[in-house]
Image: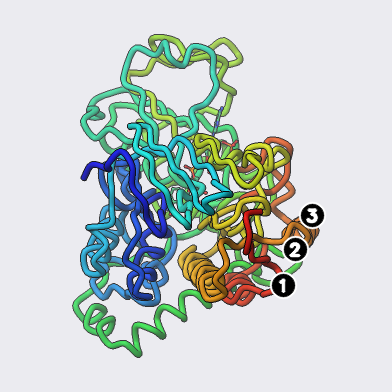
Amino acid sequence: MELPRESRHRLVVLGAGMSGLCMGVRLKRSGIDDFLILEKQAGLGGTWWDTRYPGAQVDVPAPAYAFSFAPNPDWSRRFATAAEIQRYQQALAEREGLLPHLRFGQTLVAAHWDTVAAEWRLHTAAGAVLRARWFVCSTGPLSPPRWPEFPGLDSFAGPRLHSARWDETVPIEGRRVGVIGTASSAAQLIPPLAERAASLTVFQRSANWVLPRLDRRYRTTDRWLARRPLWAGLARQGWIGLLEQVRKGFDAGHPVRYLLLALAHGLRHWQVRDPVLRAALAPQYPLGCKRLIFSNNYYPALARPNVRLETTPIAAVQAGGLRLADGREHALDVLVCATGFDTGRPLSAISIRGRDGRGLDAAWADGAQAHHGISVAGFPNLFLLLGPNTATGHTSTLPFIEAAVEHILACMARTEAAGARAIEVEAEAMAAHNAALQARLAGSVWSQCQSWYRAANGRIVALFPGGSADYVAAVRVPRTTDYRLHRDQE
Ligand code: NAP
């Protein structure tokens, strides 16, 4: 549905992924109907709309990957596919009456706080202007694809694919395929591509930690049990509790760490018979520093006769393939970049200006930061979902989203009940929160390698160091003293 050239709303949500949909559901259930959800893609789902590469699955057990208020008894397997998660999101949006609130194909280019009117002015690429009292950015950290910066990347003559924007029409059968990257996305797409390609070369810069994936199909009895609310609740909490145990494996010296190390070493030794290949697959950074990979078919795929692991750095891309640092060349028909997302400068594609015209890019010059990842000093009535330092390397992100949404609703209710114009986090509260967070992250396992959790200056801007229960307890109910209300034009 098109947007009128000018419109006014109580609230605008940006992004129709898990967090935007959660916000929409909770708004509707709170009796708030005057809101829009803008989405740049042609459909809802966020990352689960974008992620279409073969083999795409979530790496959190499905019972923990449904909202607490919207369990899904119909998951077909323990680790749901991307398509199945997108269908869950679509059904949720339909059931909760969100469809009339969604506007697809809308790219936001600017968002400016108008102090006099106490509202946000939002400008879309198509020229529409929306005014909204409240603005919630739920674009998530995993949205803009990151292409590697090799000389000649654009000169590649064949199809060039990115894991985050897959083109299903590109033929793989009988082709010579090259995959750059060996992390979560690559580990999922390499096995199915290896079955179809004539040859597949994996270009590895870093070997990653791989653990067994305890996947299985759900049977009729599983689905029957999942329809029993008590069982469904216990299963969800059970999985979340188990994943929290994995988190302990990121702490030096914890017994769980030895268990994870033993599982990773065991899997590599059991599945990779060739000692040269096995040595090349041994990670050179501490377990947990980058996202763990759970896979039973990644190592076997690398051991296939038509698959080759290349560890020499890439020097350049050419029309017919890749040239390596030692001068060797690899002829390729299809180039796949499983090189992740641009996470260092979130929201940088939008000009966001808060009180006094200050830009979010300037506020985040030393790396993105917010109060509990939700609110930013100087930006009244703006809230972020899955904002800075809310990502997790071990569990479902959904409990984080649900708690942050409750935080936002509480801030809105407090402001409106007080008859105030706006609410803004206190700069001191935000600074104290971030100082404590960075102190907790300093010397942690995540500071011991380079990953998408860190900005270019090394600051860990994406990851939350604790468990989901820590975050939920700190966030669900905002502390009154952390926020100030604006009653006048300030
Ligand atoms: P990623 O974790 O950022 O990994 C990017 C990969 O590309 C790494 O192997 C990286 O090597 C490599 N790379 C990047 N630039 C390169 C260059 N110039 N030359 C050579 N190699 C280069 O991205 P991702 O795999 O898309 O995963 C991102 C996040 O998405 C995950 O951590 C996870 O949170 C989420 N995700 C989840 C699932 C799931 O639920 N199953 C699936 C996919 C993604 P280095 O390690 O050396 O940098």
Q: Nearer the viewer, mark 3 or mark 1?
A: 1
Neighbourhood count class around disc 3 (C-alpha, 10 Å): few under 14, some 14–19, many 20 upward: some
Q: Quadrant of the N terminus?
A: top left
Residue 238 point in image, percent of width and height? 46, 80
Q: Position of residue 139 (x, y in %)?
A: 45, 48
Question: 258 or 139, which lies in front?
Answer: 139
* Residue 449 can be seen, yes or no: yes
Residue type, label 2? Ala
Instruction: Kindly identify the residue that appears in the image at 53 percent across and 78 percent down.
Output: 241
Please give the label number shown on residue 442.
3
Residue 61, horizontal then vertical, whole percent:
40, 67
- Seen from the viewer's position, the closer of residues 53 and 458 is 458
Residue type at mark 3: give it: Ala
Circle 2 residue? 429
Q: Residue at x 43, y 61 (%)?
A: 213
Question: Distance between the Cα atoms at labels 3 and 2?
Answer: 20 Å
- Nearer the N terminus, badge 3 or badge 1? 3
Q: Quadrant of residue 307?
A: top left
Residues marked 3 and 1 touching at CB (< 8 Å) = no
Q: Are marks 1 and 2 in contact (CB under 8 Å)?
A: yes
Q: Quadrant of residue 58?
A: bottom left
**Crowdedness near tag 2: few (<14), some (14–19) or many (≥20) residues, C-alpha within 10 Å:** some
Circle 3/circle 2 CB separation < 8 Å: no
What mark, if any, has residue 481 been given in the picture? 1
Residue type highlighted by circle 1: Thr
